Image (tube, helix red, strand yellow):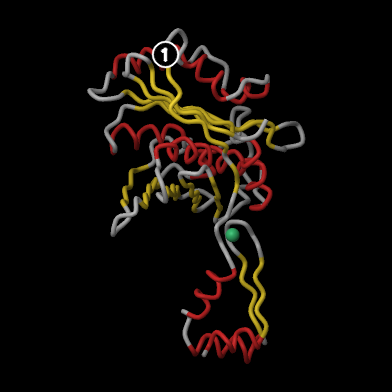
Amino acid sequence: MQDHLIRVVTEDGRLRAAAADTTQLVREICHRQQADLTARVALGRLLTGAALMGCLLKGNQRLALMVEGNGPLGRLMVETDADGSIRGKLQNPQADLPPRDDRFDVAGAVGRAGFLHVIKDLGLKEPYRSMVQLQTSEIGDDLAWYLTHSEQVPSCVAVGVELDSEGEIAAAGGFLVQALPPGDQEQLAQLENRLGTLPPTTSLLRQGDDARRVLERVLAGQTFSVQQQLPLEFSCPCSRRQISDMLAGLGQKELEAMIEEQGGAEVTCDYCREVYRYSQAELEALRS
Ligand code: ZN
């Protein structure tokens, strides 16, 4: 099934919810980042969280989530837009941590102390920036905490990544449920209790459920109307033009050094790992 997202509102208007299947884009991005097993689970959760939170963007708006903890992964950064294009990167893709209690030690890999940064480019003069301390470093909890306490929308977030016996991404996905103003915390708390009895989203996806079916289970018994359905995919907006602008912006001295000492330049995009090569002549053209 192609990666996709669905966003709904319950008929009584009290809950807004979204669910996403992100299996393929998580697989693709983890390959490009050469992430080890624990890093795959951590990055996959954050990518899924961005897909879910990104469903409220419009037009040219963009959302970036950055998790920076004191663990071996360093900085995790993901970006998405209103069209469902997503990219992500890891500062150190090798967490090199043994499992804890038979689970991948995501909290250990991210680090217990650190911050979740949320940056929204809403097309205004300055991007909106917010930052909260990591709560459990399991990522889903941290996103829920941010939404509930910083954006003040009571929220429940579940993001999951399941690996197969070869360590390949077998399924990735999750859901987000938010209480709409005046913010019915009680209804959300009831729902959270019941969610404990549901199988993980990744198990549902593996048995063939799509995002809509996942939400039907999550919102059991409540009728809802679909606000949006969106295909999701990995895509990196980097371009040769952008890299050329960046090189030109380095200034005369830097460019001259590249020409004289290296006889050219090679720039790799941190997100998609595409390599852009510049010959001496091309660098000289940028200098003028
Ligand atoms: Zn790129």
Name the residue beneath numbered marker 1.
Answer: 193
Can you name the residue that lies furthest to the top here? 221
Question: In the structure shown, which secondary structural element does the residue marked by tag 1 occupy?
Answer: helix
Return the residue found at the far left.
Answer: 182
Q: Amino acid at mark 1?
A: Asn
Eyeballing the image, is 47 above or below 256? above
- Residue found at x 51% / y 31%: 229
Q: Residue at x 45, y 28 (%)?
A: 7
Residue 25, horizontal then vertical, whole percent? 62, 42
Is 8 in front, or is 93?
8
In the shown orientation, is residue 38 left or right of residue 224? right
Counting from the top left corner in percent of width and height, residue 15 is at: 35, 20
Quarter of the rendered image showing ligand 1: bottom right
Quadrant, the N terminus: top right
Would you place residue 191 above or below residue 149 in this image? Answer: above
Left or right: residue 154 compared with residue 80: left
Q: Looking at the picture, how far across and down is residue 187, in whole percent?
A: 33, 14
- Give the side of residue 178 with respect to residue 261, left or right: left
State the image quarter where residue 260 is shown.
bottom right
Q: Residue at x 53, y 69 (%)?
A: 242
Of 109 and 175, the residue lying toward us: 175
Q: Position of residue 29 (x, y in %)?
A: 63, 48
Q: Nearer the viewer, residue 22 or 45?
A: 22
Query: Where 209 falls versus 30 (above or below)?
Result: above
**Residue at (28, 59) in percent of width and height:** 125
In which image quadrant can residue 170 be found? top right
How would you rate the neighbour count of disc 1 (Cα within 10 Å): few for under 14, some for 14-19, many for 20 or more?
few
